[in-house]
Amino acid sequence: MENKDAFKEAVDEIRSLNCLISIMQNYNMNLKKDNTGYYTNCVFHNDKTPSLRLSDKGNRAIYHCFGCGEQGDIINFICKMENLDNTTALRKAYDILGRELKYNTISDNKVENFKTFIKTNQSTIIKNKETSNLEEIYIYFDKDKKPLYCKTKYKNLFGKKYFITKSLIEMDIGYKYGEHKDFEQCKKVLYNLVEIKKAISKDDWIFFVEGEKDVETLSKLNFPATTIYTKKWQNSYDEDLKNAKVILIGDSGRSGQEFKNFIVEKLKKCCKGLKIIDLPGIENIGDGKNKDVTDWLESGKTSKELLQIVKRSLNILDKNTLQQDENGIYETIDKIENGEVKESRRNLTNFKIIDVTLYRNKDNNDQIIKLNLKSNNRQSIIEADARECFSDVRIFRRYLGIDYIFYGKIQDLIKLQQWIINYFIKEDIAIFTRTGIRKINDEYVLVTNKGILKANGDFDTTRKAINTIHNIDFTNLNILNKDEAERLCKYLFNFNSKENIYNTLGLGVANILNTFARESSMDNLSILQDLGESKSGKSKALKILRLLFNNTNPAISLSISTDFELLKSFDETYLPVFLDDVKISKVSDCKMNFLSNHIRAITEGYENTKVTENLDLQKFAYNASLIISGDEEIQENAVKNRSNIVWYAISNFTREGKESVEFLCNSEEGKELLRRFSKSLYLRVLNYYIDGAFDNEYLVTRFKYDFDEKLSLSNSREINTATYTMMGLELIYNTFESLGVGINKIINLEEASDIIINNLKPNVLEENQNGFRSEYEKILEDINNLICIPDRKIRLEENVHYKILSNNIHIAFDFKTIYDKLNNYYKQYKNDSEKLLNYNTFTKMISKSAYIADLDPKNHYKAVKIKVLVEDKNGLQDYIIKNKKMFILKIDEVKKLEMYNIIFPPDHNEGELEEILNNVVSFN
């Protein structure tokens, strides 16, 4: 007999109103509340108006339907819903509420006594001289809940499992193991048979898995599940599974596939519905071998995801939908023969579908479908445009090629398309064309060809980019600990001279900020050029930078890349394009012109257009930044003033430098540390440079280190270069600091800013000032030449065409009149290839330059008293003094162009000349 007092006590523990509400909500009942209490629609009759109410009388919650009269407490409710006895309903209630049930029946007590005995006396076994420990005890019950046999699971220290299955013989106080003959004679049943029979009676789907552990896992999720004790089918299973709808889930690996193949053929004969599930991603758990649904769920998957997979799986016994076998895809149709309706097979293909992957491009809305097909001859993956693949039978057959045949018509193709959508899309992957830091769904993330890195450190491999400019994978890549960061820092700041390290790492790492720079009101990033002789370390520096972006692809070689390939690369990433092998003297002038144009376009953010094979115009945007490694510099002013040029030499190498390069570039440890450090760099950027923080950081850095004053410039490209180089260095500094490194003992940021300036002055700034001129500066030099030209017709005169103002600070130019002279000068004295800059363009450029007296037009374009040539009454020409609007320039800035014919005209007196010559420093 049952212990009635214990049963009553167990029920009393869960008789509260809250418990009853929780139970009802578990059965998807939507409860509402008014002034008199909770109410809902009755589940025991077709209740259109809520008539079931809950009340709490004497600490006992009861329900009462005023429509059909059903009433009772929590146990009555579950008994009614599940057609259970009181004891089973009690267990069910405790399971739903997540509580431990201490009440047992006499039968339960006997089973528990037996389990306790096994755990106490047979907790270990020795097999092949190895000790294995008891892991679990599984009891097989018949439909009347009578224990039949027991399966115990043991595992040794090496993970090898052992199973012992024996029959159970009932005793007064429990059970004991039977003899071998007892097990041979006892009836073999499905595990968890009682719950399985209930599910079949309600026409619910049941899970068939490979082991008892998985049954227990699914049962805890309220999914009816079963298995068999060994891979041997019993005739009794056919009867137990009659009219069942089964979802089969096997383990991963070869043995799991063999189990599925064995069970499928058995289930086909006794079930009325059968779905075969391959859990997506299970092969990526651990080593991927022999993983089961328990492992899959414990990896972070949910019951909701499992149900979604079941919903999208094909019932292979459903004759009302397409089916497939080794001979291909077919449909079952009815035919009338001799007055009888008979089933007939109509073949649609000679192949079957293994699985399908769909890629949806979020950048251009393209859709690519990959069909994994298998015929008797071969298996291969067919890639097609998903938008047109199923639009026409001829197009579909063209994609299939010679090996795969589609027999049907257009209506069959549409039916096949729907069938594939419903059941075979293994992965529906969002892909992108452009990589780099981007804003997706209002969140900045790093998009790579392997996945998406989020600001919280998660790496989502279900969404990725399709371009392979970079290979960036953060799978199983953790950030550095303090010791590792200190070790990396030691080598990273010793691979070359300080000047080269600070400028290379600074502007190189600043390229991570390219996205924010292009979105801001600031100038775009400058180009980093690491130049020098062969074996000077410039290519190693480029490799270090690539690894700091976690990019394991080699750099692009200029010599073997076409202009279109470069243009496509610049369009498809926001990360830097790493360009190696830039040997100016060994590539064609055409290729160098293309590269120069690309550099200008990158820094200005231009677009380009190319004609496709179909004669369509395709637009390309310059989204990328650029890092160059080469032997020579590009002798073009527009390239130099958009760059930070860092010269490498063999003489820069020290013993420490060689050790650092060897560690960072050639050792697996060094390369991994760089890649792992890159993750911290990206995460810092993703979390910090948001909500306008970039603009503020740029301006703070620019003025914090006085770059305007140190470079003696205003709003120049060189200041932009210095600022970005320093921002990149600070990013490295702050990232190391966040990892616990005492970086202030390694880098002095103030000193670093001076080193950056000292690199820019000789390599970029002075060469620009002394050797290269912008177009409008060349015009000013031409104007200087016209002061002393022998040809009086085009010669310029002081106080007529220009005038030094009385303050000796400014000089005024009548550029309108001067341009008439320049036109004649170019026609008579210049080559045909030299064209005079358009007058309007020249005045706009000079008005925004450092030479102009004031950026406000009211202050730099105003009336000045000057000699103007006019005719008198007799037709004779003479000069008169007249006010005329002229452009006002700064004399000090004009001096930098060495326009001495204007500043010190040829007709000055000897005393002035002597004063000038006395200030000249002699040169030996």
Image: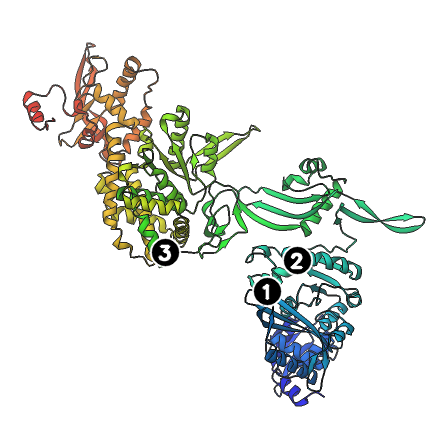
Q: Position of residue 472 (x, y in %)?
A: 46, 47
Q: Position of residue 236 (x, y in %)?
A: 79, 68
Q: CA distance from mark 3 to mark 2?
A: 42 Å
Q: Quadrant of the N terminus?
A: bottom right
Question: Is 144 in front, or is 602?
Answer: 144
Q: Position of residue 613 (x, y in %)?
A: 56, 28
Q: Secondary structure at mark 3?
A: helix
**Image-quadrant location for residue 253:** bottom right
Question: Is 616 in front, or is 389?
Answer: 389
Disc 1 residue type? Lys
For the point 67% across and 37% down, the residue is 399
Q: Secondary structure at mark 1?
A: loop
* Residue 168, placed above or below residue 216: below
Question: Is 32 in front, or is 497?
Answer: 497
Specify whether 631 is left or right of 298: left
- Mark carried by residue 160: 1
Q: CA distance from mark 1 to mark 2?
A: 15 Å
- Asked whether the residues under the numbered discs 1 and 3 touch, taking CB atoms below 8 Å apart as contact, a structural biologist would say no
Please report whichever mark, 3 or 2, sits nearer to the chain's N-terminal start.
2
Q: Secondary structure at mark 2?
A: helix
Which residue is disc 2 drawn over? Answer: 255
> Looking at the image, how many numbered discs can be counted on the residues?
3
Please report whichever mark, 1 or 2, sits nearer to the chain's N-terminal start.
1
The residue positioned farthest toward the bottom in the image shown: 5
Which residue is disc 3 drawn over? Answer: 484
- Is residue 18 something one can see in this rendering? no
**Image-quadrant location for residue 161:** bottom right
